[in-house]
Image (cartoon, coloured by chain):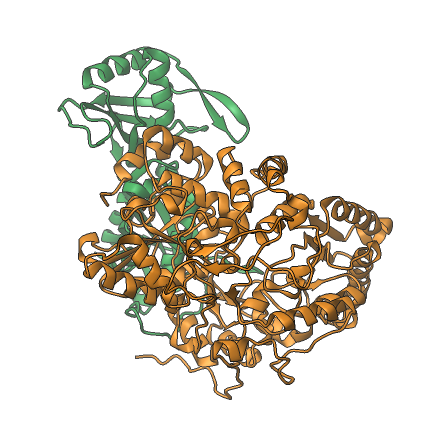
Amino acid sequence: MPAFPREHHRTSRIPPEGVALTRDDRPNPSASAVQKLRLRYAKRGPLRFTSHRDVARAFERALRRARVPMAYSQGFNPHPKVSWIGASPTGVASEAEYVEIQLVEVLEPDELVRVLDAAMPPGLDLLEAVGVPVGTGGEALADRMEASRWRIEIPGVASDTLKAAWEGLVAAEVVEVERLTKHGMRTIDARSAIVTGWVEDDPVVSPSTTQPGPCGILVVVVRQLTPAVRPDDVLSALRVVAALEPPVPAKATRMAQGRLDDSGGLSDPLAPDRAARASACG
Amino acid sequence: MSAESVFPRLEPLLPRVSKPVQYVGGELNSTVKDWDATTVRWALMYPDAYEVGLPNQGVMILYEVLNELPDVLAERTYAVWPDLEALMREHGVPQFTVDAHRPLGAFDLLGVSFSTELGYTNLLTALDLGGIPLHAVDRTDEHPIVIAGGHAAFNPEPIADFVDAAVLGDGEEAVLEITDLVRTWKQEGRPGGRDELLTRLAETGGVYVPKFYDVTFDDAGALNPVTPNRDRVPATVAKRTTMDLDAWPYPKQPLVPLAESVHERMSVEIFRGCTRGCRFCQAGMITRPVRERSIQGIGEMVHRGLEASGFEEVGLLSLSSADHSEIAEVTKGLADRYEGTNTGLSLPSTRVDAFNIDLANELSRNGRRSGLTFAPEGGSERIRRVINKTVSEADLIRTVSAAYANGWRQVKLYFMCGLPTETDDDVLQIAAMAQEVIRAGRKASGRKDIRCTISIGGFVPKPHTPFQWAPQCDPDTVDSRLRKLREAVNSDRGLGRNIGMRYHDGKPSLIEGLLSRGDRRVGRVIERVWREGGRFDGWSEHFSYERWTTAAAAELEPLGVNIGWFTTRERTEDEVLPWDHLDSGLDKGWLWDDWQDALSEQELDDCRWTPCFDCGVCPAMGTDIEIGPTGRKLLPLTPV
């Protein structure tokens, strides 16, 4: 039974803003990591236009501003120990992005969420954190990310039109779409990655002021394959099978990531860590 | 014009452009104020791409100084790339600020900071997209007052038709005084309209309003003396100088972008001004005298800025950072303070004769050991005497040898090509110097894998420098010398493979020369180039030499002048220069004498350490040199 090692370490408090650390009470960044935290964050509103590199830079700066006692890699050019698990594409919002960090002191996960979220730019919002033991192996978080559920708002397209196009897509066995990659144009099959999906029934008024009128909303669960099939590819597939041409760009949001169950649902990827922690604490 | 956010109209365009994050704002430490709760509203523009403009210290300082006033609002705007420009035109979206996405036309003032003349066409794009008439004379009370600042504003004549006003020198206090005048004028009910406001600004003697000055030419095309054309307007306009930098600790809250920018670090200006007297250097001439920030002022700014930004590198900025009177104490104090925090320190601009290995070791103690960069500027001792960059090759070799011996692997050297009196031989000696650096470095380090990169820029004579009279070297000569230099570098294969060479061809420099020393006639060329698609002229992939030369021929030749008249022609002592009525404090007679000294290869010392050479700035501006040493220490950071 892996024990959550907090009783062996002082739980440090992050100093309030404006309080400088002296050299003596500053955590030693070259110490070895004593805690690993898995975090979920959201990418919202205009900040959906950030690229993964933008997010990574903003996150590392927020760690410094919040004085999180990060562990650093060794060597000539030390880096804070941060591991990214996937990343939604530039232009796509998300409620379910994940990252792992390693610390040289043990922090209460809720405390970390509070302090780090305050240091992050509004729109990159830290949602939850779970501590996991360091160095005991265990299951990698990335292995729990089998599929994503996306919500795609398509202003200017009525639900009925969208529904018809969607039915055409799921009826097909293979739908090849083209995408520009670093290695030039390549063709991928968008259909095989699609697990399930539906068009939301309630009529929704378009949030876009430039495109008043209906706004179709497609929810789609897509398996994470290589190369990844992204919301844009699903939209391309709708164009291929049903000539669906949205008048303005659609807005996509990743709602969840996790392991697939038999009915196309997704399990919370942090749930096993939360359960392990609960049982360790008795 | 309504100040309502254009973001709902902009947002659908963003998925279709490159790097959309640069247009969404939301930078850490940015400010969005309630429009209706403010009286005076500034839009501040850096007329280049966001990634270049965001880290600009000038804009960042003014943005914060203005936003600290409760009834004043300042927002930022940058040049949009052509992909977004096309979509904005198609969908009728105006030029906007990134803070609250308000249209440019809604502001009272548009302040534009020109570090380089190559941003002029981008100003026209922003005005046009913003619905602001390109020509100042066509603007009404409904339009913002367009004010140019930055180093290029020391000769704003080429853009005189497009700006309402220009401010020379330091902006901190100038923007506050302009704000006061605008506030009063608005509160009085805008008496006399736009022209009265401009007259009140001109009356201060510190704001240049081009349309209040008549510019005429004689039959040969030469400029007549420039004179005011109405009462209350002074004959000359003086630059602004902010004294006591410790009283202006800006930026206090550095802007931290989400997008990647050209400077991924926090900057602290450790002093302003430089009196080394390099004759090519406009910055060193127009920012006199030297004003140091104290060691404690620096320590406080670094501390606050790191807290507020989360940056992991601090750049200690100035025109020649190792010349700060307490640079050793500053760097050691900061390296001690941030030991073990992975916080790097850098001195972006250092002279080889002010540099030493102790300094280098302090800089690299907590961060990465990046390359060292020095700027000998000229290849031969002779040309360095001409330009008054009095560093010796022996100093350079000694310093780089020590650097290589202490673990550095890479040294970068900056040079110029096309300097006054330059010959092929002066340029070829750059190769000899680089080879000597490699030889000495191999000996000092005992390794073969060291590198030296030489980077060569074309020289552009600038206003308010001793070289303002000099003939600019033509692009063909520059290109031919660079070709010969490359051959010389490669002539010794054993050394040459450790030497990298970077340069641009001489053509953009000639256009920069036209814009730098041009008069009001050059405005027509800028407008024509812009109408024909000229954008982002500082970027080689967008710059078109042919577009500029064709436009210049069409617009200038009917007036009896041409590009050569403005660039490669040597000017005479009695000639009226387009910026003679704009006072940088430098005595024109002193500049001429210094130009003559250059031609006879006479060096001049630095007035910080030897007596005054009467450049004229301090008495003309009522300023004085402000330097240490203070003898004080960096304050330790105390825990609460």
The foreground one among A15 and B58 is: B58
Residue B272 visible, this angle: yes
Q: Nearer the viewer, residue B353 or B543?
A: B543
Q: Which residue sits at x=37%, y=14%?
A: A240
Name the spot of residue B88 as percent of width and height, x first: 36, 33
Tell me if B297 is positioned left or right of B335 in this view. Answer: left
**A264 and B97: which one is in front?**
B97
Image quarter in which the C terminus of chain A is found: bottom left
Residue B450: % across, % down:
74, 58
- Vertical comparison of B253 with A223: above or below: below
Q: Residue A98, percent across and down?
A: 34, 44
Question: For the point 27% across and 16% down, which residue is it?
Answer: A166
The orange-tinted chain is: B
Image quarter of residue A2: bottom left
Q: Is residue B580 above or below residue B614?
A: above
State whether residue B165 is above or below residue B325: above
Residue A72, image x, y percentages: 47, 60
- Any part of residue B308 in sight: no
Asked if residue A46 is positioned above or below residue B373 in the image, the reply reads above
Image position of B567 (left or right of B534): right
Residue lying furthest bottom: B631
- Which color is chain A depicted in? green
Which residue is depicted at the point 24% across and 12% down?
A164
